[in-house]
Amino acid sequence: MDKELLRVVIILIGMLVMISMLLWHFFKSLRERREVDDYFDESEYGLGSDDFEVDDDDEMDIFPMREPVDGDALLDEESIKPTHKESPQPAPKTQSKTALPALIEFSIVARADEGFNGDDLFDAFERVGLIYGSVKVFERIDNNRLVDFAVASMIDPGTFPDTQLEEFYCPGIVFYMQPRELDKPLVVFDDFIETIDTLATELDGVVWDNQRQPLTAETIAQFRQMLAH
């Protein structure tokens, strides 16, 4: 017999077997359903609608009666008002970067007529952790190698020499901080003020604010308030 013909015959036989099994299951289920209907004769067990009654006063009621629910009351404004615990809390307001001052500039002016000496400045800067940067000013560097604030000389162009420090003198030093460029400006500002205070003591200088007036605790508090909001 040809192989293609044999394959067709096998397929047809398989289809006939499947059809036979489906018909057998169909008639079997139909027969079982009829046997169940014959067994459960409603009239034999007296379960007609006229005989099956429930006494509303029966203490053994399976479904106890309840007060009718007023659907409109569920939508009443008072009933859907959230409790104090569930009331949504407004999201905390974040400080806009543009609301911060663009630049904070304080200075330390030398009491001595000759000003600050280069050797003394470098030693003091090193003790407070300031680093001499590539643009020849000193910088506070954070853990991400970013600049928090910088210290420049009052002598134009504001840089410090890296040689012959004993011959360098300047009347004062200027501290610069840019709050809008910082992730935590208030934290940096506190370090800013602490560094200035330490250096003013070590170098014997007077601290000026951004108006070139003696820096006061009130001015510091005002800046802290601006940076904290």
Image (tube, helix red, strand yellow):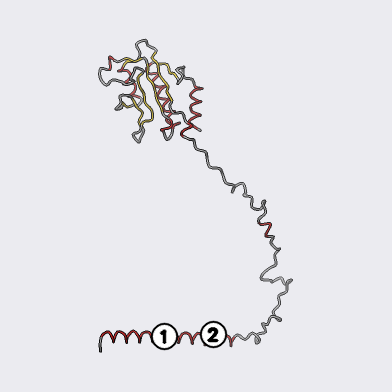
Q: Residue at x 41, y 22 (%)?
A: 196
CA neighbours of label 2 inside 10 A, class few (<14), some (14 to 19), many (20+): few
- Of tags 1 and 2, the one toward the viewer is 1
Q: Position of residue 189 (x, y in %)?
A: 44, 28
Q: Is residue 151 above or below residue 30?
A: above
Q: Position of residue 200 (x, y in %)?
A: 40, 19
- Counting residues from the start of the chain, the first of labels 1 and 2 encountered is 1
Query: Can you tell which quarter of the image residue 50 is in?
Result: bottom right
For label 2, the SS is: helix
Query: Can you tell which quarter of the image residue 159 is in?
Result: top left
Query: Can you tell which quarter of the image residue 210 is in?
Result: top left
Q: Is residue 196 above or below residue 89?
A: above
**What kind of residue is marked 1?**
Ile
Count of residue discs:
2
**What kind of residue is marked 2?**
Arg
As rendered, which of 33 and 125 lies closer to the eye? 33
Q: Position of residue 11 (x, y in %)?
A: 34, 84
Residue at the extreme top: 113
Q: Residue at x 48, y 24 (%)?
A: 220
Q: Where does label 2 land, which residue?
A: 33
Q: CA distance from mark 1 to mark 2?
A: 21 Å
For label 1, the SS is: helix
Left-right relation of 176 to 167: right
As rendered, which of 103 and 218 lies closer to the eye? 103
Q: Where does label 1 land, which residue?
A: 19
